Amino acid sequence: MTVKTVRNLRRISQVLFFLIFFWLILKTNFEVDFAGGGGGASGDEILLPYPVSIALQFDPLTALGTLLSSGTIYKGLLWSLVILIPCIFLGRFFCGWICPMGTLNHWISEIPSERLKRKGAGKIESNRYKKYQRIKYYILFFFLGAALLGSLQIGLLDPLALLARSIGTVVLPTAHTAADGFLGWVKSFGVSQLVVPFQFVYDLLAPIFLTFRQAHFHTILTIGIFFIVILFLNRVFSRFWCRGICPLGALLGLFSRFAIFGLEKDESKCNKCQLCVLHCQGADNPDIGSKWHQAECHLCLNCQAACPTLALKFKFFPNQKVTRSNPTSTPKINVTRREVAASVIGGLAVVPLFRSGDAYDVNSNPKLIRPPGSQPENDFLAMCIRCGQCMRVCPNNALHPTFLESGLEGMWSPILIARIGYCEPSCTLCGQVCPTNAIVELTVKEKIGNEKIAPNRIGTAFIDRGRCLPWAMGRPCIVCEEWCPTSPKAIYLEEVTVVNRKGEKVTVKQPYVDPEICTGCGACEYACPVVNKAAIYITSVGESRSDKNQIVLERNRAQINK
Amino acid sequence: MQRRDFLKKSGKAIALAAITGGVGFAFHNREKSTGGGLYRFDRSFEVAADSSLPKITLAKSEVYENGLNRALDAIGGIKRFVKPGERVVIKPNVGWDRKPEQAADTNPVLVGEMVRLCLAVGAAEVIVTDVPCNDARRTFLRSGIKEAVEKNGGTVILPADDDYINVDLGGKLLTSWPVLKYFIETDRFINMPIVKQHSLSSCTIAMKNLYGIIGGRRNQLHQKIDQSIVDLAAFVKPTLTVIDCTRVLMRNGPQGGSLADVNIENSVICATDQVAADARASLFLNLNPEQVGHIVLAEKSGLGTIDYLSAGYKEIS
């Protein structure tokens, strides 16, 4: 097998893994097969047909981060060893062959740009090892330091979590809006012959790419801008993200320091054409005359394939001879011990900085309503990688990325915004897809509760009597009571006769909330006919996951169903 | 400057100025915008009255299909209501993510049987749809209606955002509302509600079930619930009303949740008079129909008779 064949295999592998990753995100969706069969109406549970979060469980950074912050490696995260252990022997093959974020950066780097036009010197210079490539190690150690104190920040920059979040909450919903908008625009001309082909394409693609209902996510702009900036930086340097920022790449680089597979350079054959550098993905200096960096190499094999004189060769146990051209086949990563220590200390220090403010225990945001089954807040922050899978899968569009509702520390972690969607009592999908156990997987029985076990509560409803139709305006309305899903209902009504402005007696039913029964699902807030700011709303008080955030005196930790 | 240059340059500038001005004037509009068009609907789904037949029939059976068939035969049989080649829409109550035994949604056995009957007499297509409160995917799945309908050859349609048409409902209160198009683009309309307690309208049976044909902020209709229900009932005038009284939700309506809220009645009502149908069915909830606001208002508005016995009532035991 020639090196060019192997390079083509690498290309196929990149496309394949990217498509698998993308497909899994598309399938992170509550789908009912309406072509017949399937479903499972008879049982209580509605389960997803695929393990849609499996890709995220192969992530060694998530495994290490959650191990440091929560002390365990949850369920499928052990799969990450399938990536990490081969990396110890081979180097960062994951970055060049598998990582969907790396692949995306690879492709976008190839889009013609100012940088690519200056062939030769300019591009070769941009592909040489640069000091900025050390930043990823600082980021990695900073995040690991924070994880040691129980604050899991790796999800912000972990490439798999980042890509899942960006595609799930930004790219696909935006595509949905764009597709609907475009079709509406075509239809607006009122020429049916014009609409037919577009409608045909839409009907063909919509079941694959679009959700049943258009999703609208909170703070989509911050996630979107972050993602676009990362992609745009590829125009400045090829794969800027992979080379300079990615903490997973840094981790794999670290683990590849004892790799037995590497680049062997034959000085005698080199004609100094530098084609190897021109095509290098990792900026690891494959050319003769400079030091090769194993920890930066993505094993894309472009250099070997480009070399016209066969001076470069990837092999097991490459020649260890110490020459200026290839001082050692397995050099250490290019950061000093002091820099590592400083980064870890920075990470350690940022946690008390986060928490010395008006954090959860001191002044929790009443709107910080976590998904059902969520861990207590401190554990939640030690586990959530902000992959957005729960938000993507929620059939009611109830879960959203936070911006600052849980402080900077919890940015882009999930909250429930009942005005957009409420929590369906019989739905347990968010717990099913959570790859890290930040949201515990509940059964329907555990979520709804029965005579013996308490239901899982996410908050409590409150009535704004100044906005409520029967309370403030003498107009009939019982919609919140109608929607309340508990039995008996947490919302009850008192019939009263009030006198309106015209002096007429009007009988209305005024709603009350029973905090002992309310689970905080938010159906009332969602359904309230007072359109913009609902007259009934939920806050997090009463949530099962907290022993302090309670109003009902009798409700102690023992009642809480875990 | 050359004369040629002068002419060229000023010519271009004048042309651009003319286009700019032209576009401005072409799109100039002094009128206030009137918004989109409104669909007017003036067809009837009803079949001709037949004085030899009762207007409302009730049959009891533990086998729900039997009850339906006997009640239906007594009112003229399915052939009276559905002709070969016609398009039929069935509107069950599939409002909530509940299981059949919880009696919040119409029983799937009855809906499936109705689909089968329509197709057996040659209906071209039988569509079953609803605008539910909870997520449509969940309600149609868990209620068992999707499975029952598809097993019997019908089509389940989950409403999508662009499936609505703004219609002039022509009511006293309700004028322009988005109506799910499948309830309009049809030859026959069969209303298939279930009997449930409701805190504002006392009961949600046949006429209240018609809330489910419209989209929009229908929660606001509760402010004048009786008039809203009557406006919708006057707008639709279904071909046939089939009421599921097999399991009746006595409390915690319209969602229920606990089996303790459910009474077993094993009855099915078929009716061509929706007011009489609601009046009779409300007795299962221990209500006096003369005191149920929307039923009384419906009679006053000429939609039917509360006194179901005088309307022509037949009970098949």
Image (tube, rainbow, N blue to C red):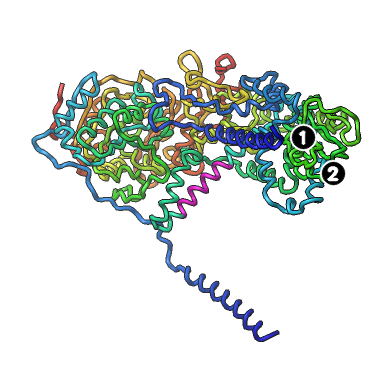
Q: Is B152 above or below relative to A532?
A: above
Q: Is residue A183 magenta?
A: yes
Q: Residue at image x 39%, y 28%?
A: B141
Evaluate if marks 2 and 1 touch, with contact meaning CB atoms under 8 Å apart.
Answer: no
Image location of residue A543, percent across then percent down: 57, 25
Quarter of the C terminus of chain B within the rendering: top left
Tell me which segment is drawn in magenta.
A171-185
> Residue flagged by tag 2: what amino acid is it?
Asn
Give the mark nearer the N terminus: 2 vs 1: 2
Q: Mark 1 — residue? A: A297
Q: Is residue B79 left or right of residue B197?
A: left
User: Is residue B4 or residue B28 the one in the foreground?
Assistant: B4
Q: Please state the horizontal and vertical placement of residue B256, each as a whole percent of the image.
A: 38, 25
Q: Position of residue A558 (x, y in %)?
A: 57, 14
Whether labels 2 and 1 share one chain: yes
Helix, strand or loop for disc 1: loop
Main SS, magenta region, reads helix
Check disc 2 and report the residue beneath it: A271
Q: Which sits in the foreground, A326 or A43?
A: A326
Cα–Cα gap, marks 2 and 1: 22 Å
Left or right of A253, for residue B74: left
